[in-house]
Amino acid sequence: MIKSDLIEQLFTDVMKNNRDGIIKTANEIIEDERKKNHATMANRLQNIINQGFIIPKNSVSALSLNDCNEQESKFFEIMFPEKELSDVVLTNENKQQIQQIIHEFINWDVLLSNGAYPMRRILFYGCPGCGKTLTAHAIASEIGLPLLYVRFDGVISSYLGETASNIRKVFDFAKNDNYVILFDEFDAIGRSRNDQHEHGEIKRVVNAFLQQVDSFKGRSLIIAATNFEESLDYAVWRRFDSTLRFDMPDNDDRVRLFNIRLNQFDGSQNIIKEFAKHMENFTHSDTEQAAVSVLKRCILDGRRMYTKSDVETAVLQQERLVNLRKTQY
């Protein structure tokens, strides 16, 4: 664990916006990690400093967070994710693409100085519960930026023209700092303008979003996620620099996800494989819930090893929930 005095000093420097102090304290933390033989963590922290992402000049500050008034706060929530890409089970193709997105964003200035922009607008689509939101959190963590999570329950209004105005307010706030901006359940505002079942308001909303995206110059990464890609407007698709499809995991993916969640405990992987047939309809989210159930059982029992009984109970319980969900939809 990092020494408490270093943590206290780092927080003090952050609140004072003391960039030099932050970097000095960060280097001391890195050195402390190396002394503890935590080379991987030390190298990752050093890489963040090398890329200039320890409080960049335009980065989010405590002051800007305080500037978020009560009215604006209903439109979005600012989070500081702790998930990493290693916490997400991805296809090789998606993993490579996400690593490229992160690499380009971190090297924003290098690309810009050579006449090129990094990928700034990404669309995640596919099956529900298959890691889209979690991946957005992990990207924010890997880049080192806060996540600005757009709350559509606050943005969408029944009053004519107000939804479009609220979308503009989100972008107006975001342009003042650096964020990973997540529009989850994006189909709520990105639906096709040609849908005969939609009224004229959806056209204004889609047009407003397109205009804001086109004019947005902030140093932020915009991620939209949807389970209903077929309902999106064609023009919306063309605004994204990259699109990633998230499909149902296979059994190997589910076993990998189980192992990630239970890596702090001892136990045989063969136990998990033994119940793979019961997880054939599990999404990433279903698998994680079953794994977390095992984890909590071990913690509360004071055990460092999970058993076949733990896995069986958790998997069969989750299987019943999955089957119940299938009968309802």
Image (cartoon, grey):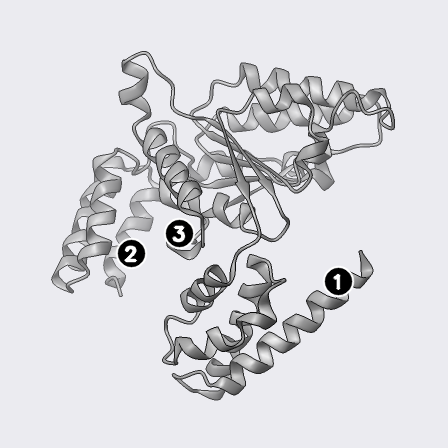
Which residue occupies 44% across, 83% down?
306
Query: Mark 1 belongs to which amino acid?
Result: Arg
Q: Quadrant of the C terminus?
A: bottom right
Task: Check disc 1 and report the residue beneath it.
Answer: 325
Task: Check disc 2 and report the residue beneath it.
Answer: 7
Q: Where is residue 312 in the image (x, y as percent from the top left)?
A: 56, 81
Query: Mark 2 belongs to which amino acid?
Result: Ile
Q: Earlier in the sequence, mark 3 or mark 2?
A: 2
Which residue occupies 17% across, 47% down?
27
Distance (Cα) linking label 2 and label 1: 45 Å
Please report contact status of discs 2 and 1: CB closer than 8 Å, yes or no: no
Q: Nearer the viewer, mark 2 or mark 1?
A: 1
Please report contact status of discs 1 and 3: CB closer than 8 Å, yes or no: no
Distance (Cα) linking label 3 and label 2: 21 Å
Query: Mark 3 belongs to which amino acid?
Result: Glu
Which residue occupies 53% across, 87% down?
309
Task: Check disc 3 and report the residue beneath it.
Answer: 84
